[in-house]
């Protein structure tokens, strides 16, 4: 089974009301905004989408709503089904398939952690049983899950054990590992690059698809980076990449999750607060973030 995703895939926010309930009505506005800004697709209920802070029924409802809106806007639809409970994960696999996801993805379990590549593959093999041939991406994000495996070695096992295995969503700081995955001698997988502020490095290594949080509100910036890189204008690509680095550095200073949701509001799509335990920006912190982003030119080079 082959699947090759190209372009920007936004790791979409889960919109919330002020009481932290999910506001599904905003999804249509999110989808319209992303499509109009040149985003190729969406990654639903991942880290940016606060997946492990949501109930299974909330995530399934998101798959339903995003399935309709992604289809309406012509967006690639990837559903993140990872979690810590097997029956819940299997239920989400069923829902993803039923609602038109072109692929599913899952991070490693985060409490009872697999100890090696074999154990991780065992977990995924059980998870995907309701739809074993639906294209599957391993979401490799060790800074969040605490699960460090040899991703290239995992690919060998996944090729044999997971009928739908097509690739890796690589949000792993180990670029040497990324090189090994891309140059794998046995398994040819689709590697989606997942570190926005290092996008050029992913392009240089051969990634053509990328999944990121800041594509929700700064897609024009990253499209310029990709276009400049593809035409060989590395000077222009690096200028915009440095803007991304500064923007993201400033957002981390405020707390990245809360800052991202604030920034998508600055871009015109109010997704509400983050759900605890992520910390919501207080009003003065949000105003300071907006002021600092404005001072660095965010409203000119990120949104246009």
Image: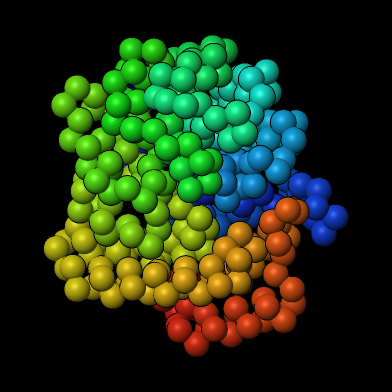
- Depicted 51 relative to depicted 31: above or below: above
Quadrant of image for the N terminus: top left
Color encoding of the figure: rainbow
Residue 234 position within the rendered picture, expressed as x and y whole percent measured from the top left? 18, 68
Q: Quadrant of residue 165?
A: top left
Q: From this viewpoint, which residue is outermost toward the front? A: 115
Residue 211 position within the rendered picture, expressed as x and y whole percent measured from the top left? 43, 48
Q: From this viewpoint, which residue is outermost toward the bottom? A: 295
Would you say residue 162 is visible in this rendering? yes
Residue 126 position within the rendered picture, expressed as x and y whole percent measured from the top left? 54, 14
Q: Quadrant of residue 289?
A: bottom right
Q: Nearer the viewer, residue 27 or 146?
A: 146
Q: Residue at x 60, y 71 (%)?
A: 254
Residue 56 position within the rendered picture, expressed as x and y whole percent measured from the top left? 72, 31
Q: Nearer the viewer, residue 206 or 39?
A: 206
Quadrant of image for the C terminus: bottom left
Tell how many labels: 0
Would you say residue 72 is visible in this rendering? no
- Depicted 292 relative to depicted 225: above or below: below
Q: Residue at x 75, y 54 (%)?
A: 276
In the figure, is residue 88 to the left or right of 48? Answer: right
Q: Quadrant of residue 135?
A: top left
- Depicted 60 relative to depicted 254: above or below: above
Q: From this viewpoint, which residue is outermost toward the right? A: 19
Q: Nearer the viewer, residue 259 or 133?
A: 259
Q: Residue at x 67, y 81 (%)?
A: 287
């Amino acid at each position: 089974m082959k699947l090759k995703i190209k372009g920007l895939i936004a790791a979409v926010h889960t919109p919330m009301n002020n009481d932290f309930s999910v506001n599904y009505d905003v999804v249509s506005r999110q989808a319209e905004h992303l499509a109009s800004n040149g985003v190729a697709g969406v990654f639903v209920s991942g880290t940016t989408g606060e997946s492990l802070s949501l109930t299974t029924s909330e995530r399934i409802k998101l798959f339903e709503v995003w399935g309709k809106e992604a289809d309406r806007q012509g967006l690639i639809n990837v559903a993140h089904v990872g979690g810590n409970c097997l029956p819940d994960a299997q239920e989400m696999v069923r829902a993803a398939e039923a609602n038109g996801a072109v692929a599913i993805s899952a991070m490693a379990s985060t409490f009872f952690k697999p100890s090696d590549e074999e154990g991780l593959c065992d977990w995924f093999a059980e998870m995907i049983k309701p739809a074993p041939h639906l294209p599957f991406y391993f979401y490799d994000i060790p800074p969040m899950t605490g699960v460090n495996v040899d991703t290239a070695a995992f690919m060998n096992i996944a090729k044999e054990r997971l009928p739908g295995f097509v690739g890796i969503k690589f949000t792993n700081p180990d670029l040497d590992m990324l090189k090994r995955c891309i140059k794998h001698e046995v398994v040819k997988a689709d590697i989606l690059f997942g570190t926005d502020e290092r996008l050029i490095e992913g392009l240089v290594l051969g990634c053509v698809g990328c999944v990121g949080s800041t594509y929700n509100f700064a897609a024009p910036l990253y499209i310029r980076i990709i276009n400049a890189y593809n035409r060989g204008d590395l000077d222009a690509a690096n200028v915009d990449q440095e803007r991304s680095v500064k923007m993201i550095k400033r957002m981390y200073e405020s707390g990245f999750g809360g800052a991202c949701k604030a920034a998508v509001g600055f871009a015109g799509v109010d997704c509400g607060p983050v759900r605890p335990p992520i910390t919501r920006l207080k009003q003065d912190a949000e105003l300071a973030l907006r002021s600092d982003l404005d001072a660095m030119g965010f409203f000119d080079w990120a949104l246009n």
